[in-house]
Amino acid sequence: MAKRRASLLPRSAAVGIVLIAAALIGPASSGAASSGTSPGPTKTVWLCRPGATPDPCETSLDTTVVKANGQRSVTDVNDAKNAKIDCFYVYPTVSRETTLNADLTIQPAETFVAQDQAARFSEDCKVYAPMYNQVTLAAIGGTVHLTAAGITEAYDSALSGFKDYMAHYNHGRGIVFIGHSQGAGILIQLLQKEVDPSPKLRRLLVSAILLGGNVTVPIGKSVGGDFKHIPACHTNDQTGCVVAYSSFLDPPPANSLFGRVGQGVSLLSGQLPNPKLQVLCTNPAALGGGSGMLQPYFLGGTTTPWLTYPDLYSAQCMSVGGATWLRVTPITTPGDTRPLVTQQLGPVWGLHLVDVNLSLGNFVSLVATQAKAYLGHP
């Protein structure tokens, strides 16, 4: 087991060092570093949009399937050109710009993470992903002072992209919201402020997939906390609901950045510690509860862009000692030499870098089922 664990962190981790406010955040002040962006509305720059060229969310989905016995096979998967629903994706922190907030220039990091996290959803939906003035890695590393104003700028620019999408592209189609880390934090706010209070927009909600963002609910409940009207998903054909978790191999420590209300990533959506709330965990492999098998997908194949390892991980939601998380358990099979993910950034981060990839196949299947239910198809 140790030998296998030492060998892999997928290539997605190269751009997956995602936003944690934690102790870095301070009050907005006139002395904060300039973001390099202009105030007020700006024209949306689309990272992913149907018909755009290039579009990293519409790339090859061909996959090499690697089984425990070493057997390999290739699957050919095509985009759903006539998809009847949309996906609205907000990417995590990947910008290596040296300012507090990133500009709207599409760079290799944004292109890669969109392919890594969002492209496979093109099997089910038309994917829209606006560039936004995200808080950069420089702010996370402390090179630039992270401020509340910087977080607000990131949200406002993503909101502007959503409003553009609704005004010009949605046309009454159902929406799946997808976000990870900073992207999830932004979507928590957007759903709180724009969708949850609006019956009209809630009718368009197919589901929300918000990973590594600390969605909250009252302890033991499936709705409340962050959202008044958007419950956790408990069945595969349920719509208008949310799937959320942070993944760990081991229980999150007391200073964990994820899985604990009011800590770490919680600051992105304005959450404070609250003993009546817990972080939501919904297991995409077993929405009704219990354990299930994950369907991981990683970029980085040699003969195909994608690799998948069936029957390599099981997962179950856990809630102990004030923390709630998705416990990922590698399956030990004699002779299985497939590499395993690790908590490379340490126990406070858990498996945050691969939150999306570990369950990507589960999510694509889930969205396909939810889309049929939303559209009224058998």
Image (spheres, helix red, strand yellow):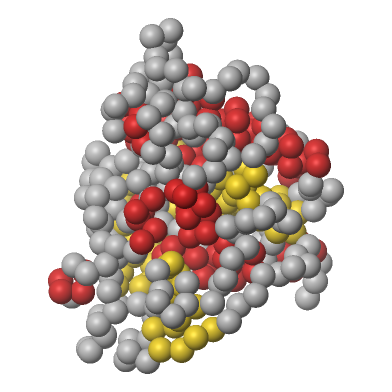
Q: Is residue 304 shown to the viewer in this render?
A: yes
Q: Which quadrant holds the N terminus?
A: bottom left
Q: Which one is in front, 228 or 56?
A: 56
Q: Residue at x 60, y 77 (%)?
A: 77
Q: Residue at x 15, y 74 (%)?
A: 3
Q: Residue furthest left?
A: 2
Label count reads: 0
Q: Which one is in front, 67 or 72?
A: 72
**Is 97 left or right of 38, judged from the image as shown?**
left
Q: Which one is in front, 189 or 216?
A: 189
**Which percent across, then down, holds residue 145?**
34, 21
Q: Which quadrant holds the C terminus?
A: bottom right
Q: Is residue 372 above or below residue 76?
A: above
**Which percent across, then down, holds residue 146?**
37, 24
Q: Is residue 334 above or below residue 275?
A: below
**Which percent across, then down, holds residue 209?**
56, 53
Q: Residue furthest top?
A: 30
Q: Is residue 296 shown to the viewer in this render?
A: no
Q: Residue furthest right?
A: 171
Q: Quadrant of residue 224?
A: top right
**Is 310 left or right of 178, judged from the image as shown?**
left
**Which percent across, then down, holds residue 331?**
30, 78
Q: Residue at x 52, y 31 (%)?
A: 103
Q: Residue at x 47, y 72 (%)?
A: 305
